[in-house]
Image: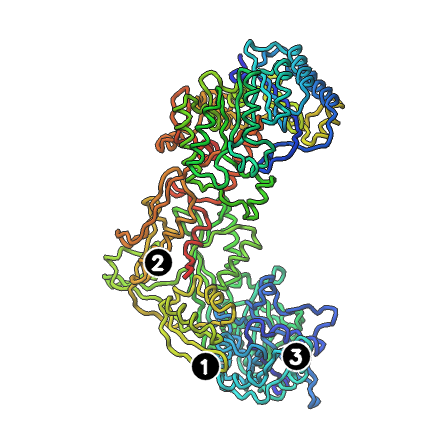
Amino acid sequence: MAEDWQQGGFGLYIHWPFCQAKCPYCDFNSHVVAAIDQTRWLNAYLAEIDRYATLVPGRVLTSVFFGGGTPSLMEPEIVASIIDRVRRHWPVANDLEITLEANPGSVEAGRFTGYAQAGVNRVSMGVQALNDTDLRRLGRLHTVADARRAFDIARSHFDRVSFDLIYARQDQTLDDWRTELSQALEMAVDHLSLYQLTIEQGTAFGDRYNAGKLRGLPVEDLAADMYQATQEICDTAGMPAYEISNHARSGAESRHNRVYWRYGDYIGIGPGAHGRLTLDGARHATEQWRLPGKWMQHAEANNADEVISPLSGEEQAAEFLLMGLRLVEGVDPTRFEKLAGRPLPVEKLAYLEEFGMIDHGPSHLRVTGQGRVLLNAVLEQLLVG
Amino acid sequence: MTDLAHIRNFSIVAHIDHGKSTLADRLIQLTGTVAERDMKEQLLDAMDIERERGITIKANTVRIEYPAKDGHTYILNLIDTPGHVDFAYEVSRSMRAVEGSLLVVDATQGVEAQTLANVYTAIEADHEIVPVLNKIDLPAAEPDRVREQIEDVIGIDASDACMISAKTGVGIPDVLEAIVQRLPPPHGGTRDAPLKAMLVDSKYDPYLGVVVIVRVIDGVLKKGQRIRMMKTGGTYDIDRIGVYRPAMTAVDELGPGEIGYITAQIKQVRDTRVGDTITTEKKGCETPLPGFKPSVPVVFCGLFPVDSSQFEDLRDAIEKLALNDASFSYEMETSAALGFGFRCGFLGLLHLEVIRDRIEREYDIELITTAPSVIYHVYMKDGTRIDLHNPADMPDPSHVERVEEPRIKATIMVPDDYLGDVLKLCQDRRGIQLDLTYVGGRAMAVYDLPLNEVVFDFYDRLKSVTKGYASFDYQMEGYREDRLVKMQILVNDEPVDALSMMVHRDRAEQRGRAMCEKLKELIPRHMFKIPIQAAIGGKVIARETLSAMRKDVTAKCYGGDATRKRKLLDKQKAGKKKMRQFGKVEIPQEAFISALKMDD
């Protein structure tokens, strides 16, 4: 019998934890250091890849994703060695997707040739905003001109180039955003990630917010209007949403992220990286040591996992729904039933349907356009009770 | 047995923080009643809540031996009474058990409303009163002004008031002499007459059972005696008899004029009623002491466990507390919004707070308290009367002839700077001014107010508009008819019983609007828009609409960190616990109380 993860695919995530500067909104596991011994890091990554290859050998790999931090600070040779090692361990899909996140600065652009030669075939660029004032407020080191230049260079090296924008920023009006989004769509190739600014605890923005000093953030109604406008503008431009914050032309969706959202298996390597792996028929959650020094120490001692623990059926079912309902395509409720050992609560489905939040049948469950912007509330109904 | 001439029984009348407990501590200390090493503050206040809030809930007594300057040793019995209006009846009984009072007034503050009420109780009990000015060591002390105020407001001679500092001990010997010289010994009292003793108060002790504080009028109380409570009819064998010094100290007997304690295998405090007369089962006295009143709750509210699975724990807690407190009543209540709980009756707001605190603290049960209500007399067209203590139970208005509500006479003392705010507050609460006088820089306003308008947040508002400078006391003044109606709150077109309230018809619109606006802020947005309405009968008098939730989504997926997403669910679960499901709407628990607070 096929294991559940096979319906989502199999991916590998590599986390590079370093940045040139920490952005005030970012709560990812990123660190700023003076000097990085890249060879030492390469060896540690390779050791972890080798170890995982013995745990889950022979699977067909759907995607590799270099995330961070700022992986475009990695030397192209390092990236090449990692990709070589991965290809040596696992059979790969014909359309294996290898994505690398890049900062749109001039230094990074100089490495694009090397990354392309190493086998990277998709770049995701953190453009974040198309006006310089806001870029500075977001703590970014690049300008709009830098970003456009880097983007053009990237396009000349990679078929697939995506970029991120953060909207619902301080003092941004609905019209400001409409204009900026139209400019972005003129630039865009086939994929765009459009995230509303989220104030996370433990970040510089979080501290300022708590102190009442982060002013001009949109109220709920404006943020909702902006989300709505984003959907309409992108639909018209032929780049509909396929996930809450991700838009693509048909067929250009990020395969790697889809492994997460379709609740496939994925290896997570690097400081603080998470994985989901089915081992001996049981799905496990893995989490690697979070601090770079600690991670290195454990990787060199041949195991950088801080946590590897089996997930209950109920936990898996919850994760399946949490991830899957982010997708416009929705989920197959029978997968939930198999994992949880129980069907979704009928009265909750009816309740959500009554308010137009979902659309469901025996083999499909989708959150509607109206419901997607209330996904947390929808999930609360289905999973909290 | 002590000669009556060498006994002095007294109480101390004081406003909170004017130094009653400290003075009691000093009297105990100076007479060597307690060894220095056993001294602690507020020696007589046993409960945590009493110590913490600086209030006295239960009467306490202490026996002090004092060798006076006249060469005789006197027995001084101090009864420390509760001072709060909620316990006015208990205070009046304690006052009847002694012959004199020390009136303690803070020389920096002057006479307060609570002092007045208690000193009048003492005057009614024919007490000799010795004024004591405390805190004279403080630079802000104005003894001359306060002396004058005592004479003006209370009408007793304060020229030979004792000048003391209970904190430093200055003047305490003068107080002891004044007790002996100026307070009378017990009036009459015959050792050979049939036993007649007053039940002053009682409390539960886990080792001894119920301990009863008694004042003997006639006859002698002895160990082994079979006694009878004249009101409740219970009979018991005395197994312990003694006095407080303040530790329990056994004695052979208590004779006329003496105050002490007995235990008699009494299981519940409920079996002992304050003010009851204790006599012997055989050959007892014929007429009980006058003035006994069964205690009647005047303020009611619902108590519900936040976690509905704790209902049985709550039942257990309430039953245990009720055993120890005859004045506290309860019955089970079911609310569509709040589930299972209890409708409880209290002597007043302080009593309510004390019981609620004790349940939360001693039994570790988090509570939702619904708005306090009073008892309305609802006269029906068929001639019957309903005593309504839960607005949710108000009968259909078409069957109601008229509704009467309890009124109080409130005395408020306040520095004139704040008088305008106080008068406005009283007017807003449907008050009728009865009197307004000035004494020095302070005004004394006397108002006839509906109790209903006072039970909820009147005292909080009074404190806030006067920055804490006002003092307030009240007494019940009986029932009066008014245009009272039940106002219902409908959330998403369904009535929420726990939010129903009785209001004056003329103020219903204003109150209804305020409630709807408040609830609109308190109820989180849902997936659909929610009408919030106030209605009388079927007629909507105020309406607000809570618009539908617009956005609630996590923008970013944090790579493969599904664990983090699951944690969001845990947070949602915790939030859900603080909500009560009402039809399709979830209402936060805090809304049930917060919605009723009027910001005026």
| Relative image position of residue A127 (x, y in whole percent) | 54, 29
Q: Are marks 3 and 1 on the same chain?
A: yes
Q: Nearer the viewer, residue B314 or B241?
A: B314
| Relative image position of residue B430 (x, y in whole percent) | 35, 68
Element type at marker 2? helix
First reached walking from the N terminus: tag 1 or tag 2: 1
Rate crowding at label 3 as few (under 14), some (14 to 19) or many (20 or more) other CA atoms within 10 Å. some
Query: What residue is drawn where x is 40% and y is 72%?
Result: B423
Protein image colouring = rainbow
**Residue wearing tag 1:** B438
| Relative image position of residue B533 (x, y in whole percent) | 32, 50
| Amino acid under disc 1 | Tyr
User: Label 2 lies in what chain?
Assistant: B
Rate crowding at label 1 as few (under 14), some (14 to 19) or many (20 or more) other CA atoms within 10 Å. some
Q: Which mark is residue B137?
A: 3
**Residue wearing tag 2:** B511
User: Label 3 lies in what chain?
Assistant: B
